Each structure stands twice: as structure tokens, then as C-alpha cells.
Amino acid sequence: MGSGLEVRTVTTGFTPRPRVGRAPRVLVVEDHRYLGGLLRDVLPQGGFEVSLVTDTVALEGVLETFEPDVILADFRLRGEDGLDLCRKVRSHPLSGDVPVILHTAIDPRNLRLQEALTLPRVTLLLKPADFQTMVALLREQISQNPDGAETATPLRSV
């Protein structure tokens, strides 16, 4: 993307770690039935345990029962968007520092998307993204060990 656009991941000093003896957990938030099903079925091949919700209404209950290590969410959801989702995740007591990857095809200059990217531990993955890139970013976000300082993660596009 020749625009020089950079996505910043702001960290707050705590990184959730996968529990020993289980696969890292990815919560997929995708309202498109086909893509959500595809992610739910394919991500386990990358070594992840996956839960799928189709909207932000179901999000809160799943945050309490599934305890994700990372959230992969479409930015455009019915009723609410990724900014609303990120605010809900950040305000939830069990997921306040869980990394969120916004997976979208919208213009990265979208103002609501840019606002979401200013929230702690929010990263952008542009659609379409190949499987290897997605798995690498999921693993990177799960294993990142912030030292409390702000870090920059480059914009990913494939």
C-alpha cells in the first residue's frame, strides 16, 4: 500500500498466555455465514481451538465461557462495527487485554477503523489474507510479550 499507513498496537503491559496443555484459543466474530464457517473449520489446522459468534450480542457470554487468547473479528458486523466490538472487549473484566485482530476489506483510512486501532492491542489484517499470514499473526499476537512500552505492528496485506 504506498500510503505509508502504519497500524499501531498499543499495549497495557499484560499478555494473556495460552494455558499449558491446551491449544491457543481463537474467538472468531464473523457475521458472514460462509466465511465464519470456513474460519471455524480451517483454523484448527493451524493448531487453534476455535469458537465462532456471529454478532456482538453473543460476544459477552462467550468471553466468559471460552476465555480466548486472541479475537479475530470482522470489522463490519450487523448492527455494530469493530469499534463497538473492541470497546466491549476492552471493558469486559475477563478480556480487557486480549489481543483483537480486525479482519476487514474496508479502506484502512475509515475513521471508525482508525479509532479502533488506537485502542490497546488492536491490529488490522486486510482481506483477503492467506492462511499462513493469518496463522502467523494470530500466533504473534498471542505470544507477544509487551514490556509496557508502545510497539508498532506493520499493516498486513496479502
Image (cartoon, rainbow, N blue to C red):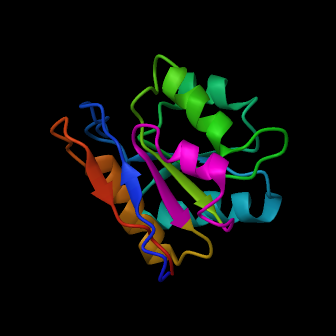
Q: Is residue 55 visible?
A: yes
- Which residue is more in the foreground, 58 or 50? 58
Please provide the residue range marked out in magenta. Answer: 105-125
| Left or right of 16 in this view: 69 | right
Percent of width and height locating residue 103 = 59, 60
- Which residue is more in the foreground, 108 or 58? 108
| Left or right of 139 in this view: 158 | right
Percent of width and height locating residue 87 = 58, 30
| Left or right of 102 in this view: 32 | right
Residue at 65 percent across and 23 percent down: it is: 61
Percent of width and height locating residue 91 = 53, 21
- Which residue is more in the foreground, 85 or 20? 85
Q: Up-down: is 130 above or below 21?
A: below
| Left or right of 76 in this view: 1 | left
Q: Is residue 27 visible?
A: no
Q: Up-down: is 114 above or below 94?
A: below
Q: Up-down: is 63 above or below 41?
A: above
Q: Quadrant of residue 86?
A: top right
**Membership of 79 in magenta stretch:** no
Task: Count numbered badges in the picture.
Answer: 0
Percent of width and height locating residue 5 = 45, 68
Residue at 67 percent across and 52 percent down: it is: 75
Q: Residue furthest left?
A: 147
**Membership of 124 in magenta stretch:** yes
